[in-house]
Amino acid sequence: MSSISDFFGSDVFSDSVMQRRLPAKTYRSLAHTMTTGSPLDPAAADIIASAMKDWALEKGATHFTHWFQPMTGITAEKHDSFISLTPEGQLMMTFSGKELIKGEPDASSFPSGGLRNTFEARGYTAWDPTSYAFIKDNTLCIPTAFCSYSGEALDKKTPLLRSMEAINNQAVRLLHALGKTEITRVTTTVGPEQEYFLIDRELYRQRKDLFFTGRTLFGAKPAKGQEKDDHYFGAIRPKVSAFMKELDETLWRLGIPAKTRHNEVAPSQHELAIIYSTTNIATDYNQLTMEMMKKIACKHGLFCLLHEKPFAGVNGSGKHNNWSLSTNTGVNLLEPGDNPQDNAQFLVVLAAIIKAVDTYQDLLRCSVASAGNDHRLGANEAPPAIVSMFLGDELSAILQAIADDKIYKADHTDMTIGVKALPPIPKDTTDRNRTSPFAFTGNKFEFRMPGSSFSLSGPNFVINTIVAESMRIFADRLEKDQAAGRDLSEALTALLKDTISRHQRIIFNGNNYSEEWVKEAAKRGLSNLTSTVEALPAFVSKESIDLFVRHGVFTETEIHSRYEITLEIYHKTVAIEAQTMLEMSRRQIMPALASYQEMLSRSALNKAKLAGLPCEMEQQLLQKIDGVAADLYRKTESLESLLIQAKGIADALEQAKAFHAQVLPAMQELRATADCLETLVGEEYWPFPTYGELLFSV
């Protein structure tokens, strides 16, 4: 077998490939754009395109596409071949700088939230030169942004790139105010952890709910679920191991540094972690990872579920977003050092993040709002809907000492394990809190609220922008203090003390799952937005609009369009789920009940007539099933009525509220009745695979 280093990044037009294939001047121009975000020299575009085409043809590519991330789905692409004809009709393989830089896909069928009329079809894709091109399915994929004819963002990447520029501008200002003038650029980095389920593909195809919605709408709890915690970190089954092996190798060829794989808590649940990268590249990597998971799973007779809650009663799936900031000088701004109490740079950056999370907690909650994630957040498997920060004992004590004008004394000790053969281990300054939504984990913050199907773009453009705002306020204050001749140390102490005193309510190091915390959070004045419908208005509040416009992340028009699109996706998601339930109830469950009842009736009749035997069991079971079946029919009719009513509401927010408050509860009631019937009906009569089959078949 060849080593990983022999093929890692082999399908990527990477930095090393560009160095070999581009003229030195062109390479330097592109490298400058990639590291600083400055515009690309137009003269270099044709040279880069030609080199990219030659490389792609050598790798067997026949087409190219502008690979982008629309507001729907994982990714989008329109393929064009390299083929062109000379005037004499001779075949040529061409790819120009113009084709590299800009594409023109039809944008009419993508949601716009009112940005344009349906008949206005033109849209543009613009090359993102900070993210490497790659080859997939014999196609050269060029990462791009996607915008409308009039320039509004229609994708998930554009606001992320804008937010990265915003936090760079304000972080550099703040660091210069601290005397760190050698720093000229600050970049956010992310390392994603992706949770997912793998189930048998044939069983998946037999479940209409999984096929149409990605989650099970019916399903009685099996005799065994995750109660014994025996799946977590357990031995990986051969079929799953084969899938993971091919997935790793595919990702490595695409230059994606897949690092960790393991079984997760729920049966058939797994996780993949990737080494951190610059945020926009990490987002591209994660989108590709989700795509490859689905594609490769099918090759192994499996199906990959990325829904946040595919199975009731067991853990759902999230996507942990490990976020940090790095400077052009190679410094991680969230590295506390050995003595964080003496690290003014770290403490100022930390204070800016604390202020950001507290001030914009509703917006941060809004960034992870979706119909799927509503089933997961708040359960004892994921952070609650209440946003808070975990800092650990030492950092919390340092900040409290600053707020109280006291001197902090560090207490670093060794951890005693109790086995003589093992050496003493230096005790970490903090444990990890797996229940916290926004937890400090040594040199980064782990945002644990995003759902497994999410693009990393949404949570990160919010984090970047709210932290940029705190840094702007800090930089303004310190620059004003310096202009007035105030001592920097004195100014920093005052800034930290003021910030901590105002915003320390957001810090909580305890159990976020407990009822006591819900009560305590309410006393502190923290929000508890338990649903998407409650959370989304925060996105269009005056405070949020002012924030995004101030930093150039969105125009006000773009903000309102995103809000409308998200509401539309929410109510359509629930409507599809409700319609699927109606179909499964009427066309699968009810006929199955009739068949089973008919069999019981025949059995009772035969026993009584032919053998003169009592048929008490059949009669009682028939009576019980008949009562529950009648309830199933009533609840099916009720759900349909509520669904029709909700669909008829014109206002988008009011419609979403109706789906949340009326349709979803009716779906839960119908499910409870159907799940009861599943436990009463003979196994061979039940019309689709059960939880036991789905969760334990691989």
Image: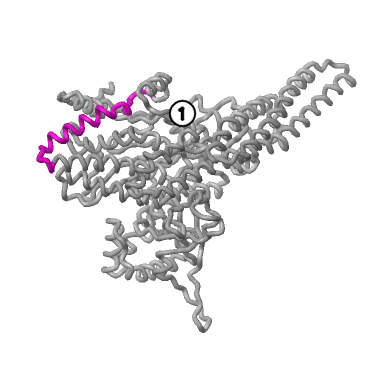
Give the percent coordinates (x, y) of residue 168: 27, 48
Label 1 SS: loop
Q: Is residue 370 visible?
A: yes
Would you say residue 489 sits in the magenta stretch?
Answer: yes
The N terminus lies in which quarter of the figure?
bottom left
Residue 592 lies, with reference to residue 255, above or below; the image says above
Quarter assignment of residue 658 = top right
Residue found 75% across the figure and 34% down from its top: 591
- Amino acid type of the residue that numbered disc 1 sits on in the rendered structure: Gly
Residue nearest the observer in this picture, 121 or 99: 121
Q: Position of residue 689 (x, y in %)?
A: 64, 35
Camera-side residue of 647 and 407: 647
Q: Which residues are magenta?
A: 482-511
Left or right: where 417 falls relative to 236: left
- Residue 261 visible in the displayed image: no
Q: Quadrant of the C terminus?
A: top right
Magenta segment main secondary structure: helix
Q: Residue at x 59, y 32 (%)?
A: 664
User: Does 207 sit left or right of 58 as displayed?
Assistant: right
Vertical placement of residue 219 versus 77, above or below: above
Going by the picture, which residue comes out furthest to the right? 609
Give the percent coordinates (x, y) of residue 297.
53, 46
| Residue at 49% in and 40% down | 196
Give the labeled residue for mark 1: 378
Residue 117 shown in magenta: no
